[in-house]
Each structure stands twice: as structure tokens, then as C-alpha cells.
Image (tube, helix red, strand yellow):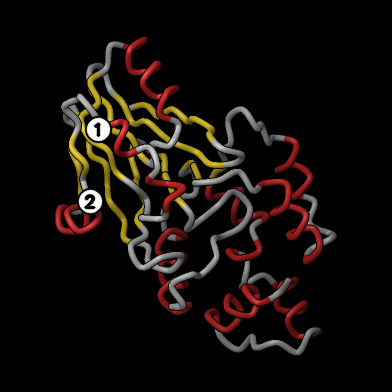
Amino acid sequence: MQIRQFRYSRDNFSYLLYGARKAIAVDGGAVQRILEFLAAKSLLLEAVVNTHGHADHTCGNAELLRGGRAALLEDDFLRTEGNLQMEGETIEVIETPGHSTDSLCFLASGCLISGDTLFNGTVGNCFSGDMAGFFRSIKKLMALPKETKIYAGHDYVRDSLAFARKLEPDNRAIDAYFANYDPAHVVSTLAWEFAVNPFLRFNEPSIIELLAARKMKRATEFERFESLMWIE
């Protein structure tokens, strides 16, 4: 199974997971480019799914479904199924509530489409208000293989790395991460996220020292994660 990234609006991303004949669209806001790609590759769009229900991620659904054979697989169905199959390969559906109550990630062929849960260099806002649930979702993603490729819902890399550098000015991995940043194809690995993303680095001595200097809660992993979420 292959993955194709499409940028739309200013910083949103759509994705296609595709094989030899079929494809599944994830957060399909880049409608025209997706349709052109499907036509060029002679692919049948089998399904449309979303990482969550926010309008900037669902805005392409209706047009992708119009006049075709694709089905909209909504979050309740995806949670019940747990996995999707396409051309004999598995797409794992991972429940990651936190950014929103309905947030999902999709894992296929070593690639994680992480929506607004995990970004390249940061994490999403906790709009659900369930910070503990969000932390559990992040921990779930942290347990994936370190070589897992991270394909996020937005390109926030520049601002994210500026924030990471503010917290850990001596972290040389940040410069190396930015050197590999390509706006035309935004991707990292979980290993790189552990190296630079402050919200995955809550056990690092430098982060704990920072929280201590700011007199913020830090006794447990969750307290450190939550404290980091409050830093501006």
C-alpha cells in the first residue's frame, strides 16, 4: 500500500492510501488534486474517512462522494470495525480522543496518518477538554515502532520547532530535523519526534529541569505532559 499527500488551504493535508486498483481518501479537502491523481492512476476511490469531524478536515467529503461509488465510513463504524482492508492489506484504525472526542489515526504500511492528534514537532490542542484522555492517546502512539512515518493533518513545522527550540535551546536535533523539512512532502518518523517534540519528551532531564525552574507540576508523566501543554 502506498500513501500520497496533498496540501490544501494554507496548511491542511489530505491523504490517499492506494494500491494497484483502489484507494481510500483521508481528510479529502484537496478534492480536485485527489480526483486528478485517481484518474491519472486509474484508481477506484473505494471509501472516504476522516481523522475527526472538524470542518477543515471534512470539507471535501460531499464532492468526493458525488457521482461515484465511494462510501463515507463514519467514526462510529470505524471504531466498531477496528481495521479496514484494501487489496488484502490492513489499515489499522486507532482511537485517539483528545484533540476532539472523535479523533482517529490510521496506520498502514508503517505510515501513521495522525490528523490533529500528533503533528510533526508538536501535538494538537486539547479541544475536548479531556487532557488525561489526550495523554493516553499520545502514549498509545508513542508505543508504535520508532521507524513509523508520521503524516499529520497540518504543516505546523516552523512554529513547532521554534517552540521546541525555546524550551530546549541546546537540543541539536532540532536543527537536523529542520534540515530535513520539505514543505512539498511533510513527514517525520516517531524516532525524530522523540528527538525534538517536547510533548513526547516529558521524561527528558532537560524538560523536567525546565518545569522545575518554572515551578510547574512534574511529579508524574501526566503532570509533565499537562504542564507542557500550558506553556506558551
- Quarter of the image containing the N terminus? top left
Marked residue nearer the N-terminal end (1 or 2): 1
Say which amino acid is labelled 2: Glu
Q: Is residue 109 left or right of residue 190?
A: left
CA gap, disc 1 to disc 2? 13 Å
Say which amino acid is labelled 1: Leu
Q: Which mark is residue 16?
A: none
What residue lies at 31% left-to-right and 61% top-to-bottom?
A: 95
Which residue is disc 2 drawn over?
Answer: 74
- Quarter of the image containing the C terminus? bottom right
Element type at marker 1?
helix
Q: Nearer the viewer, mark 1 or mark 2?
A: 1
Residue 135 at x, y percent in the picture: 47, 72
Residue 38 at x, y percent in the picture: 33, 18
Residue 205 found in image quarter: bottom right
Residue 43 at x, y percent in the picture: 27, 17
Q: Is residue 125 left or right of residue 31?
A: right
What residue lies at 76% left-to-right and 89% top-to-bottom?
A: 215
What residue lies at 20% left-to-right and 54% top-to-bottom?
A: 82
Farthest residue to the right: give it.
170
Relative vertical location of residue 149 with respect to residue 124 in this rendering, above or below:
above
Which residue is disc 1 drawn over?
Answer: 65
